Amino acid sequence: MPFSFVARFFLRQSVLFCLVLMILAAIPLWAVEDNGNFNNNADPGASILNWTSGWPSAGMDGWNYVGQVNGASGTYLGNGWVVTAAHVGAGNFSLGGVTYTLVSGSTTSIDGGNVDLVLFQIASPPALPALVLGQVPPIPFSEQSGGDSVALIGYGGGGGETWGLNTVTAVNFTLSVLGRSTIDFCTSDGTTTIGSQSVTNNATVVTGDSGGGDFIFNASSGKWELAGINEAMGGASYFVQVSAYVQQILDITGLAAPPVITSEPQGMRLEAGSPLSLSTAANGSSPLTYQWFKNGAAISGATATTFSITSTLVSDSAAYSVKVTNGYGNATSSAANVTVVPMDISNLTTPQIGIIGQPVTYSIAVQGAGPITYQWLFNGTHISGATGNSYTIADTTSGSAGNYSVEASNTYGNVTSNASQLVIVVSQQVIQVGQSATFTATPSGTGPFTYQWQFNGNAIGLATGQSYTVSGAQQNQGGIYTVVITSPSGNVSSSFSLVVNIDVGDTPTMPAWGLAVLALLLLVAASGKRIRMESAPSDH
């Protein structure tokens, strides 16, 4: 079986599993959770470094933050605040063998109660530093990359604290449960190999796990982050995506968090006179302040999430960035490279073929703020009177050969097109594939004469006669044929153009009776019946 088929099969199974979860969770449910547990993986305690081979567990202390509330789970965030699923509800919180009392009146819903999350405070909280909250979505698995591994922790299954490892397979989808819409991510059960990568999933969210924490190791920062909150509803398990609600959580709890830029400003190319708008988005403890920079220098007054210029100039071309700051640190975006040009100009066709005695016309398309003026050039020198958006040579001669370009100008500056080479030929022949063409030199002056034929500037071997014939021409033999004539007085050359077209008349066609038979066969195939064809009986 082809490898690519196997890879696609397993990838589809993972995606199908997530889709099933979404459908199940979308059904109106009572606050009833599944049964089972996280493979009965007990709290590893001191043996944490060995709990999964190769897992970057240094600093992983999520176990110290997940406790019990109302028979299910809750996750301590820090600063006296706990988060759990809204359908679990606020209550006294047990953590590490200690029960902490709910602070009356502290219960706070996220997003006005539209999300299945709730925050509440506890009295005399534990002396734990605040959790690091995930500020960007987890990375889902793909055939090209391994995706994020997530440690799921909860008090499900009727026992003590349990845990398991899964791999994120989908992010940023919305589920509607109990009348609430929540942005989530999901994982799939089992171990699946796609390509050379293994998707490890050994955990299932079950009874009592709702409100527990899901932790991901951020290799960039070297810290563990709370990426999600467990949800177990009527046989479906999924995880509320913390990054979607992190700013609300920070604002409510007052947790200390330095800025994290979640949306980078994007570079662009503009025509002068067009508006410029750059924007960013960031999470972090409030208040957040912004400062935009141009080529590393602060822009006076540019202190909002968006930086705009109503009408750009060429001098506005630069690398723009933004620095976001709060009381706990700062973050600087990547540079957005902005290029402002006076106008955009199309390319001239090159080479251009001109036949002696016949006209040749060049034209240009320019987009930009008007008025626009034009000046055509021949071999870099202005052509007198050639100031339109097109230029015509009415009667070409051998002296017309050379390079043509055009300079376009407006109030913002000027741009010059590419140079188009005009090749002057004695004649042009147009033939079909398989036909032949003959070119003949007609020298003047006193001989003797010698000849060397060239094709597109390259000498043709043994082509040293006064005439040259292309026999049974193919399309790739179309081009410029030049003969260099040498005499006692010097060298001269003449060029000829050959165009080789496919003869559309040679395209095979099906006769009418063939079309009728084909139509009959298609009808029979569609009906699922068989047809038997026999020869007519002989008269003999």
Image (tube, rainbow, N blue to C red):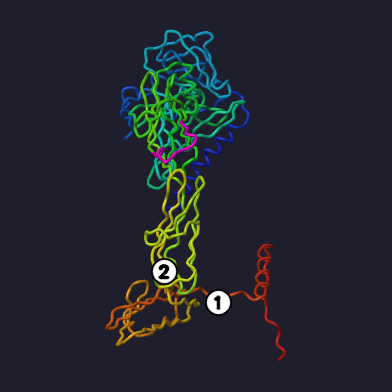
Q: Identify residue type, mark 2.
A: Ser
Q: Position of residue 266 (x, y in %)?
A: 44, 38
Identified at 55% across, 77% down, the residue is: 506
- Residue labelled with disc 1: 506
Q: Nearer the viewer, residue 268 or 389?
A: 389
Q: Residues within 10 Å of mark 1 (few under 14, many from 20)?
A: few
**Above-or-below relation of 41 to 90:** below
Quadrant housing the N terminus: bottom left
- Answer with the quarter of the image where residue 29 lies: top right
Q: Which mark is residue 400?
A: 2
Work out which residue is located at the far front of the displayed protein and give it.
384
Identified at 48% across, 48% down, the residue is: 9
Q: Position of residue 330 (x, y in %)?
A: 36, 24
Q: Identify residue type, mark 1.
A: Asp
Q: Which residues are magenta?
A: 307-317
| N-terminal label among 2 and 1 | 2
Identified at 56% across, 74% down, the residue is: 504
Work out which residue is located at the far left of the displayed protein and give it.
488
Assess whether residue 16 is covered by the magenta stretch.
no
Secondary structure under tag 2 reads: helix
